[in-house]
């Protein structure tokens, strides 16, 4: 019987860290991951592209696959991303939920919810249903029969309105 060539295995997942920047091209500003040495790769983010564009200047950890070269830089296909600490403070991406006067940020990947507090938390109330990032102090607090993570918001950014949330 004739031998078939082996099925090609998918490229292994790779994780990179750097800062979100943009190419200098006036026509189409590519999203670029950079570090102190300059541009590392161009990010092809698919459904997360709008979110990554909103994170310019912030540090991220991206996981995905290398996919060849475009415009001199390697292209990286982003499967997922997470924010690195901002100003030394933990940063989390999630969807805002407001129930009974309590504002929570629900991080869909691990399924964790954080109760938001602090003066800036009040500024987030109109964004219930939006996907946002927050950075600040996390504290475990005793809740009603269970421990709860309290997140004191020190900075935030709006990523997506409710009608365009990425469901992947």
Image (cartoon, rainbow, N blue to C red):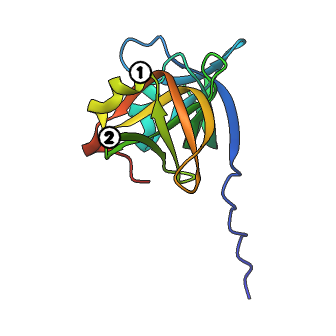
55 shown above or below 131: above
Viewer-nearest residue: 16 or 98? 98
Give the residue at x 52% y 27%.
152
Give the answer, above or below, for where 164 lies relative to 133.
Answer: below
Local SS, label 2: loop
Q: Is 125 situated above or below 27?
A: below
Calculate the distance from the C-alpha at mark 1 to the C-alpha at mark 2. 15 Å
Q: Identify which residue is drawn at 44% across, 39% down.
A: 48
Residue 101, label in figure: 2
Crowdedness near tag 1: few (<14), some (14–19) or many (≥20) residues, C-alpha within 10 Å? some
Q: Which residue is mark 1?
A: 120
Quarter of the rendering occupied by the N terminus = bottom right
* Left or right side of 165 for 80: right
Q: Is residue 162 left or right of residue 154?
A: left
Q: Position of residue 146 (x, y in %)?
A: 58, 55
Residue 31 picture location, percent across and down: 49, 25
**Residue 85 image point, x, y percent:** 63, 25
Using the rendered view, name the quadrant where residue 129 is placed. Answer: top left
Residue 150 is drawn in which quadrant? Answer: top right
Q: At which x and y percent is residue 33?
A: 60, 24
Q: Where the C terminus falls, by quadrant?
A: bottom left
Mark 2 burial class by Cα count in 10 Å: few <14, some 14-19, many 20+: few
Query: Which element type, helix, strand or loop, lies under badge 1?
Result: helix
**In front of the other: label 1 or label 2?**
2
In front here: 80 or 71? 80
């Amino acid at each position: 019987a004739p031998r078939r060539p082996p099925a090609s295995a998918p490229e292994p997942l790779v994780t990179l860290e750097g800062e979100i920047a943009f190419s200098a091209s006036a026509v189409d500003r590519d999203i670029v991951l950079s570090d102190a040495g300059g541009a590392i790769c161009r990010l092809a983010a698919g459904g997360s592209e709008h979110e990554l564009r909103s994170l310019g200047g912030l540090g991220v950890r991206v996981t995905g696959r290398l996919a060849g070269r475009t415009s001199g830089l390697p292209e990286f296909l982003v499967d997922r991303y997470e924010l690195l600490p901002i100003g030394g403070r933990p940063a989390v991406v999630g969807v805002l939920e407001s129930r009974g006067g309590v504002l929570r940020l629900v991080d869909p990947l691990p399924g964790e919810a954080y109760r938001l507090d602090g003066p800036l938390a009040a500024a987030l109330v109109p964004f219930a249903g939006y996907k946002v990032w927050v950075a600040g102090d996390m504290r475990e607090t005793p809740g009603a029969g269970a421990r709860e993570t309290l997140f004191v918001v020190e900075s935030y950014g709006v990523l997506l309105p409710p009608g365009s949330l990425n469901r992947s």
